[in-house]
Image (tube, rainbow, N blue to C red):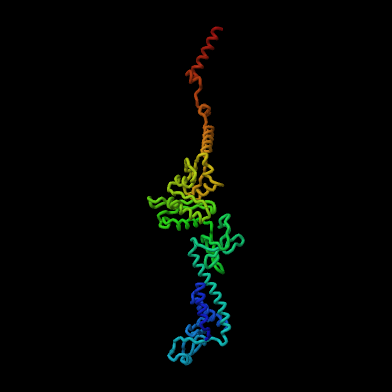
Amino acid sequence: MIKIGTALFEATEELEREKGISKEVIIDSLKDALVAAYKKHIRAKEAPNVEAILDETTGEIGVFRTKLVVEKVEDDNLEISLEDAKEIDDEVELEDEVKIEVTPENFGRIAAQAAKQVITQRIREAERKLVLDEFMEKKGTLTTGIIQRVENRNVFVNIGKTDAILPFREQIPGEYYKPGNRIRVFVLNVKETNRLPQVIVSHAHAEIVRELFELEVPEIEDGIVEIKSIAREAGFRTKLAVHSNDPEIDSVGACIGPRGSRIQTIVGELKNEKIDIVRWSEDPVEYIVNALSPARILSVDILADDENAHEALVIVPDDQLSLAIGREGQNVRLAHKLTGWKIDIKNESQAAQAEAAYQSQYEEEVPVEDDIVDETDAADEEPIVEEEYGIDAEDMVEETSDVDADSSEEE
């Protein structure tokens, strides 16, 4: 047996406190290391009946081989005679199993080196598993971290047992990320790697707005007010569609709060990002009108509403066109994301011109009936002479004959 004392147990307890790795994991790693070192020492790839045993009372550890007690030994590695077994245990009988210590002499240094390598590897694996399990549970949730550093436009944020990566595409445009500052981020994904798992977070995700409203608005947390849809352009503007399951509670008013206290807190958290709260509706016309607020809408015409397309034409007053479209198309773009409808916006003048052009084109395309001559009908008509006078061909022949006869008599 190898004397290791109480230092190992003290070290395992410290690791358990600092890194959350259980004492059993460390001890099992040490046992596996000793068995691996023993196999290497005896130059054997497999040794199924070999195990390491640690006596926590004495602080000793050793390698033991389990053998079957038989009358005649055929395989010295697996069997032991009854006579030899009696020297170890007087009460042993045939077909019993006994554990025989096979720890080599001067095995301490070899075992220590092997134990160090295996324990280090196991600690890393245990840390990786702990981080993976912890952040797999946090995936899709909001968490708070501390900015550590900025490298190649990526921001590294410490969120507990690991540093998460805030990629450039998930950052708010124009935001300055100073090391040491606290930041609320959304856990997007957790990728398993050979070292610690890689955690990807976002500071621009729309779900951050949802989490903030759930924290600030009790009605949302209780399920009385429901967030139906969110459309966000981080750092600039967000549209939020809400619906109240209680007719006595105003969904928009609940989100704004008394004197705007709730919405002001959220806006401050989002660095003064503009937030539009609109009422959700099952009626697409009403929903589109609400989504385009604060612009005033004259009419909404549904152009397509099926599985393949949802399109609508919106008419606004001439002075409301720029407001409805928004700066660089932001308002209508967010309304499209919020509702899922493709929205075409025109002012009254544009709509009138389009209607006039359509009417003009329609009149040009419609033919005038008086100017049309149907050649087939003309060919089928009877001779004009017959139609006007009712004289058939035989009468004309008779009259001609009479004339000729009179002429000959006169001569």
The x and y percentages for residue 105 are 56, 87
The x and y percentages for residue 5 are 52, 84
Compare residues 73 and 343 and report the one nearer the observer.
343
Whether residue 118 is situated above or below residue 393 in the rendered picture: below
Q: How many labels does the image show?
A: 0
At 55% from the left edge and 86% from the top edge, which residue is drawn?
104
Compare residues 398 and 142 and report the one nearer the observer.
142
Residue lying furthest front in this view?
A: 259
Compare residues 51 and 163 and report the one nearer the observer.
163
Whether residue 165 is situated above or below residue 337 in the rendered picture: below
The x and y percentages for residue 320 are 51, 41
At 46% from the left edge and 56% from the top edge, which residue is drawn?
213
The x and y percentages for residue 354 are 53, 37
Q: Quadrant of residue 224?
A: bottom left
At 57% from the left edge and 64% from the top edge, which residue is drawn?
148
Question: Where is the C terminus found, in terms of image quarters?
Answer: top right
Residue lying furthest right in this view?
A: 152
